[in-house]
Amino acid sequence: STYIDELRAHGRLSHQQWLVLLIAAQNNPAFAEEIRVCAHAIRERYFGRTVYIRGLIELSNYCRNDCFYCGIRKSNGEVSRYRLSLDEILGCCQVGYDLGFRTFVLQGGEDAWFNDDRLAELVAAIRTHHPDSAITLSLGERSRESYERLFAAGANRYLLRHEAVNTELYASLHPARQRLATRLDCLRNLQAIGFQTGAGFMVGAPGQTLAHIAEDMVFLGDFRPAMVGIGPFIPQHATRYAHEPAGSVDLTLILLSLIRIMLPNVLLPATTALGTMDPQGHAKGMRAGANVVMPNLSPADVRGKYLLYDNKMSFGSEAAEGLDTLRQRMAAAGYEVVVARGDQPPLQI
Ligand code: 5AD
């Protein structure tokens, strides 16, 4: 298709082109398959059949934010709150290292206890203990100075989904004090500092239309993140969206493929939300052009407390200790889990 060719050649499309392309892909399975095959060829060129793994450590479920869709939002009184100690987090990293992880993702709610001093100490300690590993942070919005300090302490990557680049949609998903402009400033700061920076959004978020997704795709084409996290929205029973439908797995897969075509060297996970919605989610994600899986490396006793949505998977192939299951499943689908940092490779000409 001409739009696919143009997306490959220029790495971006207009909003109108995206909308036409998304409607066509969603309504025509043969076209969706053509997109998938194109994306998979690019995946193979950059990454072969390898799968990068990241050990996900959920260090705190305290959060000052109140995102309307999220299970650990501040006003959810059902949540039993926890935070891991420095020693517990270092213990998780050691367990992960021994299993073959060479990237640790420290993710958490926006918890003031994890101030710059504590986080810089934590990052420096991981950097010292595991000099050959990458450190990814996913800790929300912070000041430019804070990001600079964490980068100087040894962090390499930062995940901060933009959630929605449309002002009205962003405002409908978040309380008024959470501003899209702040989120975008943070993303630009992270990229300018030198982090491999990740953006992304939920597919099928309440109120989201294909026109909104087209806007998000324009944004990703302009911002050119090193990583993109997308997964289906999944309702959480204690939020206002408890009875909203979950996002579509098929649309998520189409978007993974289109993101791979637009950003050929992007680090693209088959997310936990995708794995939660579909037991074949990881393999389907890889076949669509994804190249990363992020198994849960948190202590088993806190996993049930980090529930962004209902039925969130954190055991089996979604867990670090289930890595052999993941390896076998990936091998059965024709992919190979590798022991590597898995940094973003350079663009090929
Ligand atoms: N369903 C799917 N994804 C969710 N997230 C938060 N709540 C949900 C939900 N109900 C995603 C957001 C956030 C990331 C950590 O998890 O996009 O950025």
Image (tube, rainbow, N blue to C red):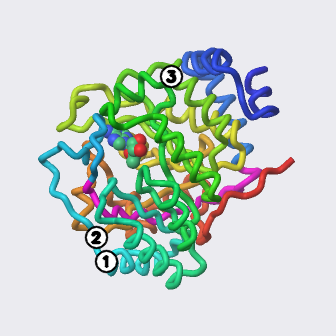
Earlier in the chain: of badge 3 and badge 1, it is 1
60 inside magenta stretch:
yes
Residue 170 visible here:
yes
Q: Quadrant of the N terminus?
A: top right
Q: Nearer the viewer, residue 226 or 97?
A: 226
Disc 3 residue type? His
* Residue identifier under label 2: 84
* Residue identifier under label 3: 212
Asked which secondary structure carries label 3, the reply is helix
Position above or below: 148 against 187: below
- Give the Cα separation between the discs numbered 1 and 2: 6 Å
Is the distance from the Cβ of mark 1 to the nearest ligand 1 atom less than 8 Å?
no
Q: Residues within 10 Å of mark 3 (few under 14, many from 20)?
A: some
Asked which secondary structure carries label 2, the reply is loop
Is the distance from the Cβ of mark 2 to the nearest ligand 1 atom less than 8 Å?
no
Disc 2 residue type? Leu
Residue at 35% across / 57% down in the picture? 108
Image coordinates of residue 246 in percent, x first then y, are 34, 30
Earlier in the chain: of badge 3 and badge 2, it is 2
Number of marks in the image? 3
- Circles 1 and 2: CB distance less than 8 Å? yes
Asked which secondary structure carries label 1, the reply is helix
Q: Residues within 10 Å of mark 1 (few under 14, many from 20)?
A: some
Position above or below: 199 against 215: below
Image coordinates of residue 291 in percent, x first then y, are 60, 52
Position above or below: 269 against 211: below
